[in-house]
Image (cartoon, coloured by chain):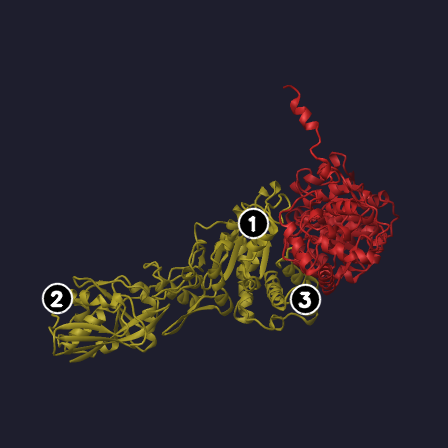
Amino acid sequence: MIGVGTRQEAIPQESGRSKRRLAPDEWVGWRDVRMGHLDAEAERPYWIALSLLPGIGPVGFARLLARYGSAQAAWRAGGAALQVLPRQVPDAPLAFKRLARRGVLTVARKVEADVRRAGGVVVIALDADYPRALAEADPRPPVLYRAGEPDAFVAPAVAIVGTRRASGYGRSVTQELADELARAGVTVVSGLALGIDGEAHRAALQAGGRSVAVLPSPLDRIYPPRHRELAAQLVATGGALVSEIAPGNAVGRPDFARRNRIIAGLSQAVVVVEAPDRSGALLTAAAAIQLGRELYAVPGDINADGSRGSNRLIADHHASMVTSAAGLLTAVGFASGGRPLSVTTLSEIEGRVLYRLLEKPGSVEELLHRTDLPTSALASALTLLEARGLVTSYGGATFHPTLAARRIGQAR
Amino acid sequence: MLAQSLSASLLGVDGVPVRVEVDVAFGLPSLTIVGMAGSQVQEARERVRSALRNSGFELPARRITVNLSPADIPKDGTSYDVAIALGILAASGQLPDVTRMAETALLGELALDGAVRAVTGVMALVAAARASGIASVVVPAGDEVEASCVSGVRVLPAATLGDVVAHLAGVRELPAAVASPPPPWAPPANVPDLADLIGQATGRRCLEIAVAGRHNLAISGPPGVGKTLLGRCAEGLLPPLEDDEASEVSRIYSAAGLLDRRRPLVRQRPFRAPHHTVSTQGLVGGGPRVRPGEASLSHRGILFLDEALHFRADALDALRQPLEAGSVTIARVEGALAMPARFSLILAFNPCPCGWLGSATRQCQCDEGQARRYAGRLSGPLRDRLDLWVTAEEPRHADLDGAEPSSAVAARIRAAWARQLARQGRANGELAMGAPAARLGLPPLLGTLLQRRGVKFRLSPRRLERVAAVARTVADLAGEADIRSEHVDEALHYRPEAAA
């Protein structure tokens, strides 16, 4: 009796009939796919239609291509093709039947029309304007929806990601990093989320650089809605929006995990600024490691919940520590684009307040002690410094010097 | 036979003169009261019946009809009992000479034994009688101090129905009450002092500005840092009521039945802090028998809503009208009723359900939508009417040493208040909307500065008007005739921050 169990496990379950079927744990990735012979135009409708099926992700798509040689062949195989997928979704056969009934060309044309209406184009992995960095990633999304120019993906890109509930410190550092990168001609990639992501996009725009946002939602439903305007600005300034989800589809939840993989895939390095435990930014970090991208993290307060995840990336030697914006730039291999120095005249009181803030950000109560000013004088000085763009509170209690203020500090 | 007597009715916080007409006619013995008389008035039949009999008079066994005129306003309360009884006596010939009764208003509830009992709102009722040209008013004994707060009318306190009859018949005169000079104002006792508050430099400053200019103040911040104490300190900073304000406020308290009968004239500026479970009616007034709500009870003073975001949304929203118009209007089938409610509002609340949003020391645990929904309980229009916004910070250990006491701050506030009244006759926060920059004496250059800041900080024109008014108060507190740019900048520091 002894050893029977082990022997049974060792015996292959499959019989000769299903020899060509891939075992569930058998890894097939894009490296096993030969695409050189495929005609992009002929394949396009099949790629689009297949990518709409539930349960087909980048890995599943690669398997189909590896098994059938082309999307067209996989589509023709019909229901049988679905058996190859690593993840079996009960809805998939029915969804396939529905799409098949409408006809692959109709389906693809409808998607392309929806994308056009949302101001974008469909890009499949066979296209020349499929982002170069992503084309080297494995797994990679077979079909992308893009708004904005393909040029946005030519320059080297670095991703900056972090928590939505960013602290003033996190926002301030994000601005500095994004500004430095954008000035050096690096495209700043992020996820358009509130907090760190939004700050990174905005700072890159303000520095006159390019920024790419990867959406967790279709192009026609910008998520979060509050960043709709920001998204439009990104496109208008030479950046782009990218999504893996087809527009015009039924309402679904934003898919953050897939978005985060694309963020890492598009970038040569990923910088995590402020991430609590179980932050989505840590998924991006994991994707970066999996895809072989450089990973950096900004050290934060060891007592702050908001920095626990990012600090651990450093502690566990997954990420290199960012100690300055210039240091990050050198580490990712770029020369500083230079910073314009700003000159401004300040009163004695304003100068005193700003100087204290450059030493260390602080709340009004702290500043009262450190500047020795009456409440009223400090209040008006802070308003003036805010109006000049030298100081900001990011909506919280702590006041921080802005990038412009640090430039004055360096000029001294 | 027909007779009439005079009384007064309470409508909201105001008195309305009421003519009590009594007709005693042949027919089945009955006593009917008409003229939109509520249940308390209907019960007057039984009180009057017993009181008459027990005072040695007789209720004629006739068909008696009592009409309360004007008959189109609803009447409630017990203040007509004496007038009804006297009307019946006159109509049944038991009071032969009615000349005195024609010029005397009669107020009072009757006990079954004929004693005259106190009624609510005597001050407003007497004021109404005087306004309609009545020279003397009979009031329940014990209510004469309150009634005497109304000048220009003879107040006659009566203890029993027999006394009233004797006086009106000219048999025995009721002695007129002598108005005693109101006691001098003394600062309220048992209110928290700013010296007890730890830290909160910005909060103190905002409170001073808010009280000095009668501005509305929003205090947000994490739990346990002293928001409630800060708000409650406002009471000790309020200057006493001016004379005309004192009688106005006293009338409201009289109508609400909240007056101290021995010291009826309210000198202390109201400070009301209703609990967050208060109903809309309790907050702005109303009810089947319209009563002043907290908004009217805070008239000329401060309404402090602690945990403001936990108040019912409709209750908070109902405050918009008084904040705008200075009065509450209760619409009824019978018509609209206005009650004065010009208060400054102080709100204290947590910025999010957990309370730590925006804090420098602790991470907020709420999710984005949760926090936004929470803050959204304060509607945009209400938000717009809050002039000063301050975030209370956690106190630091260095703040534990002594702070300025309320008395010193109150002195500055009184000086600033006097300056505003001398210049424009009212507080800066009470200046009506629209082009206040010009009215506040904001120099054109500063108007431009304000516009520029408005663009930079994305402030609405209405917000800028509020900022200008606050800047005016800051200048008044500094004792300066002209607003300067640092005053404007300080006022801008207390703007609501749009969370990024």
Q: Colour of chain A?
A: red
Q: Do the residues labelled 2 and 3 touch (CB within 8 Å)?
A: no
Q: Do the residues labelled 2 and 1 touch (CB within 8 Å)?
A: no
Subunit of label 3: B
Q: Where on the picture, by quarter, is residue B162? A: bottom left
Q: Which of B293 and B421 is in front in this view?
A: B293
Which numbered circle lies on residue B53? 2
Q: Where on the picture, by quarter, is residue A291? A: top right
Q: Mark 1 is on which residue type? A: Glu
Q: Nearer the viewer, residue B477 or B87?
A: B87
Give the CA separation, mark 1 to mark 3: 31 Å
Q: Chain B is drawn in which colour?
A: yellow
Which numbered circle lies on residue B285? none
Give the CA separation, mark 2 to mark 3: 75 Å
In this rendering, the answer to whether B385 lies above or below B310 is below
* Left or right, A159 with reference to B16: right
Q: Mark 3 is on which residue type? A: Leu
Q: Where is residue A264 in the image (x, y as percent from the top left)?
A: 77, 46
Q: Mark 2 is on which residue type? A: Arg
Which numbered circle lies on residue B404? 1
Q: Which of B97 and B284 is in front in this view?
A: B284
In this rendering, the answer to whether B365 lies above or below B301 is above
Which residue carries the number 3 mark? B450
Q: Position of residue A207 (x, y in %)?
A: 81, 56
* Left or right, B303 with reference to B150: right
> Which residue occupies the extreme top position in the image?
A2
The residue at 80%/41% (across/down) is: A292
Q: Where is the N terminus of chain A found, in terms of image quarters?
A: top right
- Of callouts 1 and 3, the N-terminal one: 1
